[in-house]
Amino acid sequence: MTEPAAITLEHQPRLRKLFRLQWEEVQQQHVLLYPEGMVQLNQPAAEILKRCSGDARVAAIVSDLEQAFQQTNLQADVLSFLQIAHTQGWIEHG
Amino acid sequence: MAEPTVVLPGVAPGTAPAPAVRPPLWLLAELTYKCPLHCVYCSNPLDYMAAGKELNTEEWVRVLKEGRAMGSAQLGFSGGEPLMRDDLVELATEARQMGYYSNLITSGIGLTEAKIKALKDAGLDHIQVSFQDSTKELNDFLGSTKTFELKQKVARLVKAYDYPMVLNVVLHRLNIDHIDKILALAEDIGVDYLELANSQFYGWAYLNRDHLIPTRAQLVAAEAEVNRFRERIGDRMKVYFVVPDYHAERPKACMNGWGAVFITVTPDGTVLPCHEAKMLPGIDFPNVRDHSLRHIWQDSDAFNRYRGDQWMQDPCRTCPDKTKDFGGCRCQAFLLTGDATQADPVCALSPHHHVVEAAVANAELEKPMISRPLVFRLDKNSQEFCKL
Ligand code: SF4
Ligand code: SF4
């Protein structure tokens, strides 16, 4: 894999096939499930990953989140989380 | 299981109070003890032939429902060989509908193309195939049946049906020198995750321990080979190399603590905190035929016996690491000291650590002392243990 290291606003990130994102009622949080493992996500992380469909560009994800949660200036947070998610191998750039 | 909570910069993590007994996030369904293989390191109980009648489909569905309602999210279908159950596809369908992430843990025997397709349609998430070794002769010897070519075919099928592919190989003295071939095979098949797990010494592996403990030199060479491979393969494959605990200074955090994350339901419905725990004497492990899973997990004596740290004695009781490793493995403590409340003797601080050191030292001898010939996991051998 020779993908560039940094996620930019132009990328269209997609959750990798190995992972499934779902709400867990008992834990009252979203989790990422993968072969024999689980990552527990807080709400912002889950909201971002939900939008990693492979169709939406990061810029669109940011504005969608800003609108949905009536906030501004989320760009830096979103980019830095996506960077973590990419390093962890949860998403691919697209 | 990794449990990191990801926290965005500037966002506080959730502050909900933790319930006293956490949910059993991982449910292992050992569907059957039937298995066409006879591995010398098998972790099934020696007296598996004494187990009661297998749970039927309806009973398993009830167990899965109860587990899911308590928060189980990861589900493992294992055994024995789970493909020996003819209701596997039905159970996988139910599991998917309930929202489990389901893992099939198989030797691959019995996994035909039609079965793979049916399981895929049922919503099975992942298949883990285990190989004894990549060398046909040795594999046949260790598995004691002609299985290697079949498994290779199966692994390719798993990939072809677009499953994430986890290949598991149990390493030990007799196969660890073939690590280069195992790695080459994994690369060839296009594995996503490769688990190289050094044999643990319970059950049949404990009987065969003197044959299976590797030398330090073998371990060092194997790990170096693995590291060279990792460098070359990069992101294409994740390779886990689990150092055998006999060669470590501290024990593993066994099961993440007793009754903390894992719940195992055995073929006849007996419920265990780990698939080895049946060996512990003086504990009445409850059965899903008599109680709900919730009662068993939360209230039974068996599950509360080694929860927390009240049961500990020194050195664990006063050790700062007890919240990290929970004193290691209860079964290993019992096997090696006769007392399940001792520190796991793998720990250098354990007063019984010399037992582990002696076994490791024996392995370093040119001709290690062997207490008995290799014992294969065979029904007739198990029957002998049932008599004891
Ligand atoms: S370890 Fe070998 S013998 Fe034991 S259940 Fe697994 S495949 Fe069968
Ligand atoms: S003394 Fe007990 S708690 Fe401390 S490191 Fe050893 S096993 Fe773990």
Image (cartoon, rainbow, N blue to C red):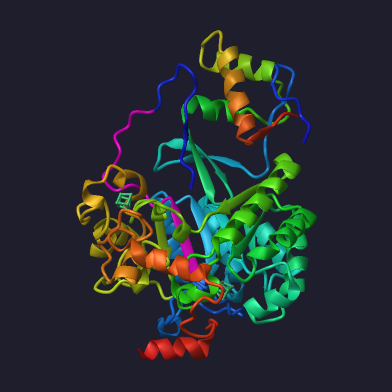
Count of number-bearing discs: 0
Residue A31 higher or lower than B174, as above or below: above
Q: Residue at x 24, y 52 (%)?
A: B315
Residue B21 on the magenta span: yes
Q: Residue at x 55, y 64 (%)?
A: B215
Left/right placement of residue B306 relative to residue B158 reads: left
Left/right placement of residue B224 relative to residue B377 reads: right
Q: Residue at x 48, y 50 (%)?
A: B73
Q: Which residues are magenta?
A: B14-30
Main secondary-structure element of the magenta-colored stretch = loop
Q: Residue at x 70, y 64 (%)?
A: B178
- Residue B164: image location, x then y, percent: 68, 51
The outermost residue toward the top is A72
Q: Which quadrant of the rendered structure holds the C terminus of chain B?
A: bottom left
Left/right placement of residue B150 relative to residue B248 reads: right
Q: Is residue B287 visible?
A: no
Q: Is residue B223 visible?
A: yes
Res B90 quadrant in image: bottom right
- Residue A90: image location, x then y, percent: 62, 36
